[in-house]
Image: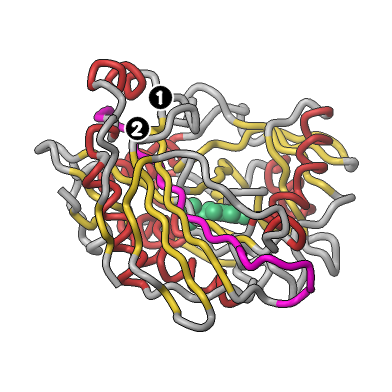
């Protein structure tokens, strides 16, 4: 499968593009092009097409509208010191996309084909990659069920689309996020779709998000569906807890039990924290451990991580059991160190020991 290029012949002017890239926000502007690929059960994947960004036409009876058969990915292209552009671990996104597809009964896209579509879009829209540290081109691949029909069964037609949006640095180094630990709503149960990156998981989480906002919180942290006590993750980011400080600190993240989304940032930080000399552990952490840990001072820092925000400090946690604060409520030194170390690799200013960057330009 190849990518047939038929790029936008009427792109945004470079002056206007530069203006947008200078103040990108998140998801506010989209690049000049997109990639579309069609799959059918009868013929498999057809060649992808790089074409002008724009609206798509779908039959109202396309299955995605009725039964939510949809998956997506989130990944970033980072500018490099010599003016080039690199993707961060695109193979990991490709593999997860294939796993998500399998769970949602959508077709698996070959890893090389997926990565090729991303490379071609980044090359075509290279002028949209912001240059500042922490800024990036956020890339959103997704796949929808496009068979026309209302029968409930896996679609025999799927459409893959790839779009990109310049993204500002998400992180506010002066401010930690507050989280609402939801004891009412569940994100994922064993045997469900928690490990798959699918829109349905997000649809199910919006009400809890609304409740969090009502409680004055920025994000929701979910606990397990069965025992209702183990901390799993936030709606779109994995969690890390730091015990102790300095060189003796231990960096702990909830174990992947089958209901957590296996974040690529989470995985990278496990390796990176070891490189920085910290001990790491994947463990079961309960709400009680969280509360008692921050109250006693054993837990010194908490942060959330994911492609979009990279690393975000978690300050206050609130639930029906009360409110408690990590440290002084401000982003801690190890959180800041890990964020800076990861960004340095992504932006090519630190050695890429693990071969995570894939040069595109
Ligand atoms: C995407 C996502 C994450 C973070 O994964 P990254 O690969 O680090 O971006 C965490 N939780 C959920 C539910 C997600 O969808």
Query: Relative to 110, is 129 on the left or the right?
Result: left
Q: For the residue with label 2, is its CB less than 8 Å from the closest atom of ligand 1?
A: no
201 relative to 263 in the view: left or right: right
* Residue in view at x 64 percent, y 73 percent: 155
- Quarter holding the N terminus? bottom left
Q: Nearer the viewer, residue 298 or 212?
A: 212
Left or right: where 289 falls relative to 86: right
Query: Residue 193, how many percent across, how many down?
Result: 69, 68
The residue that appears at 81% across and 57% down in the rendered structure is 186
Q: How much space separates mark 2 and mark 1, taking CA atoms? A: 9 Å
From what the image shows, is residue 129 above or below residue 353? above
Question: Which residue occupies the foreground of this view, 183 or 284?
Answer: 183
Read off the residue under disc 2.
Answer: 135
Q: Is residue 35 visible?
A: yes
Secondary structure under the numbered disc 1 in the rendered image: loop
Mark 2: few/some/many CA within 10 Å (<14, 14-19, 20+): many
Please state which of the two labelled residues, at mark 2 or mark 1, is closer to the viewer. 1
Residue at 42 percent across and 52 percent down: it is 162
Task: Work out which residue is located at the far bottom of the displayed protein and give it.
Answer: 42
Asked if the magenta segment contains residue 141, the reply would be yes
Q: Tell me which corner region of the image, top left, top right, bottom left or bottom right, holds residue 82.
A: top left
Q: Which residue is mark 1?
A: 24
């Amino acid at each position: 499968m190849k990518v047939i290029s038929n790029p936008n012949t009427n792109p945004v002017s470079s002056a206007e593009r530069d203006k947008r890239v200078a103040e990108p926000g998140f998801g506010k502007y989209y690049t000049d092009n997109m990639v579309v690929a069609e799959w059918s059960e009868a013929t498999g994947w057809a060649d992808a097409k790089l074409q002008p960004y724009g609206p798509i036409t779908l039959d109202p009876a396309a299955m995605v509208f009725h039964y939510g058969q949809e998956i997506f990915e989130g990944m970033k292209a980072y500018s490099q010191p010599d003016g080039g552009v690199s993707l961060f671990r695109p193979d990991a996104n490709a593999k997860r996309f294939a796993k998500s597809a399998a769970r949602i009964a959508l077709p698996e896209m070959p890893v090389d084909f997926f990565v090729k579509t991303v490379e071609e879009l980044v090359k075509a829209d290279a002028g949209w990659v912001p240059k500042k540290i922490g800024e990036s081109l956020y890339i959103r691949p997704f796949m929808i069920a496009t068979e026309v029909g209302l029968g409930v069964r896996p679609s025999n037609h799927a459409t893959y689309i790839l779009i990109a949006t310049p993204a500002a640095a998400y992180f506010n180094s002066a401010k930690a996020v507050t989280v609402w630990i939801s004891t009412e709503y569940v994100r994922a149960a064993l045997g469900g779709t928690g490990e798959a990156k699918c829109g349905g998981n997000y649809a199910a989480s919006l009400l809890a998000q609304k409740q969090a906002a009502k409680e004055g919180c920025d994000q929701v942290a979910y606990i397990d569906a069965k025992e209702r006590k183990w901390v799993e993750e936030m709606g779109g980011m994995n969690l890390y807890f730091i015990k102790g400080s300095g060189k003796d600190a231990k960096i702990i993240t909830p174990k992947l039990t089958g209901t957590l989304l296996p974040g690529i940032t989470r995985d990278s930080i496990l390796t990176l924290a070891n490189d920085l000399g910290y001990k790491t552990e994947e463990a079961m952490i309960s709400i009680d451990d969280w509360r008692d840990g921050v109250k006693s001072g054993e837990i010194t820092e908490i942060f959330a991580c994911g492609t979009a925000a990279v690393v975000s400090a978690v300050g206050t946690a609130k639930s029906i059991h009360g409110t408690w604060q990590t440290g002084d409520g401000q982003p801690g030194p190890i959180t800041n160190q890990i964020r800076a170390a990861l960004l340095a690799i992504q932006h090519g200013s630190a050695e890429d020991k693990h071969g995570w960057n894939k040069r595109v330009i």
